[in-house]
Amino acid sequence: TPALGALRIRPRGALGIDRRTGRIIGVAAEPAAGVAAAALVGGWTGSHVDDSDVEVIDLGADQFLMPGLIDTHTHAPQYTFLGLGHDLPLMDWLEKYTFKHESQFRDAELARTVYADVVRRVVRAGCTMAAYYGTIHLDACCVLAETIRAAGQRAYVGKVCMDANSPAYYSESTDESLQATEAFVHAVLAGHSAADASLLVRPIITPRFVPSCSDRCLRGLGELARAHELPVQSHLCENPAEIAFAKACFPGAASYSAIYHAAGLFGPRTIMAHCVHMSDDDIRLVRECGVGVSHCPNSNFSLSSGVADVRRLIDHGIPVGLGTDVGGGYAPSILDAMRMAAAASRAIVAARRDSAQPAGTPLDAGELLFLATQGGARVMGMQDHIGTLDPGKLFDALVVDLAAPGSPVPPPSATPAVLEHQRDGRHEQAWALRAEQFVFLADDRNIARVYVGGKLIHAL
Ligand code: GUN
Ligand code: FE
């Protein structure tokens, strides 16, 4: 998806990867029949290449290559109560389920077992890069970062900060919060620069949300983000009760966004999740600061938070990606996030039909694929490195197998429209329909291989 609304399909493409750098060295849209792989690679590199220097991987007739899925917002510890508590609204859900479960990660051994399982699951779902929240515990967050690195996934990992309005059994002092965050940053970077995009796992500054943090904590975190050039993640305008709470904590603030902004936490490396109930002032600040939005439709439906108007954000020029927000959302897959985003946008269009506002159009499959890949890359500040399969980018990609055993995607023989295009040689049109079926029907069984930085990290 080179742009929102553009779906680029190459029915007979070839793509070269340099194993040493993990980057794409060239793409041939339509290589001439019979041309040797070594000749293609020689053309891309401008030097002579022997057959023995090149490993060729041929994809089958029902397989295709696509950019890896990007989860711009998920909570690793919340996999421990997946699917529970969705009858509650956000603030009650946090108190009754979330804080209790997260507090158990004071035990780093629990983190070791749970996080190994979480990361395996996220990778298996085709996610090549995720922005993870851990808990408030330094040790468990270091375990999470190590686990992700060992799995070969690309990620931002945040130590959650909570020094205000939090239960005694799950909170920290302001100094503890800032010191542990700084220690975490140093532990994860281990002497590297946060600006080094080839680093697989990098720290992200993570105030839980405004109600959980004092003014001094937020400002201290803003200072850390600036000093180390780090990304920032938090929650924004998710639920009306949450917004009222945030404003009550900072009575002078013009908007929820203004609180993060005043603390130095708003910038082009900032990811704000949800953004369901955005005032004009919120939209203005988010746009002016280059903040990216993580659209988490499963969570927004599951916690009855509301329906985010993603078109409105996009039309304002705000970068938007998708997030699973496990466990506010119950599904740990960006494929699900695409479907839920489709449902959310249709709900908005349907609700507007009888209003004075223009109804607009729902997101289509190509737009959903954009949000899941390049949209996510932009939100992560990684658009120069991942998100499409263009030369120069890191090879973060999936091999999708539509004919995998048990595949929920029907074969072309069951879809006459696909068969007809295939029979008449209209392969792009045939693949466009199959891509649409992939978006709405596929699951882990179709994610045959997952590559990050040119390395195979999962295969069925
Ligand atoms: N706001 C503050 N913490 C959380 C969380 O864990 N999940 C969601 N969805 N919203 C939050
Ligand atoms: Fe969240």
Image (tube, helix red, strand yellow):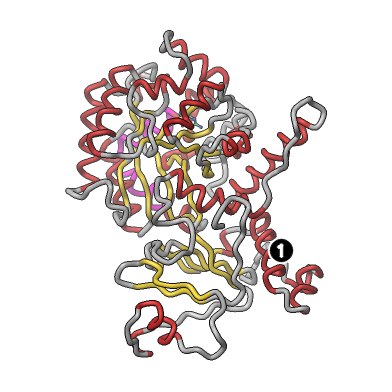
Is 114 within the magenta? yes
Q: Name the residue under label 1.
A: 433
Residue 137 percent coordinates (x, y): 30, 34
Residue shown at the point (57%, 31%) measured from the top left = 85
Residue shown at the point (42%, 26%) measured from the top left = 209
Residue 362 percent coordinates (x, y): 71, 43
Disc 1 packing (10 Å; few <14; some 14–19; many ≥20): some
Which stretch appears magenta? 99-117
Residue shown at the point (51%, 54%) measured from the top left = 69
In the figure, 272 relative to 385: above or below? Answer: above
Please name whichever residue, 289 or 218, is drawn nearer the observer in this view of the structure.
289
- Prevailing secondary structure of the magenta residues: helix
- Amino acid type indicated by mark 1: Leu
Quadrant of the snapshot with the N terminus: bottom right
Please name whichever residue, 277 or 446, is drawn nearer the observer in this view of the structure.
277
Q: On the image, which quarter does residue 410 sit in?
A: bottom right
Please name whichever residue, 65 or 332, is drawn nearer the observer in this view of the structure.
65
**Does any portion of residue 326 appear in the rendered image?**
no
Please name whichever residue, 423 or 412, is drawn nearer the observer in this view of the structure.
423
- Outermost residue on the left side: it is 191
In the figure, 130 relative to 456: above or below? Answer: above
The reply, left or right, for residue 92 in relation to residue 174 is right
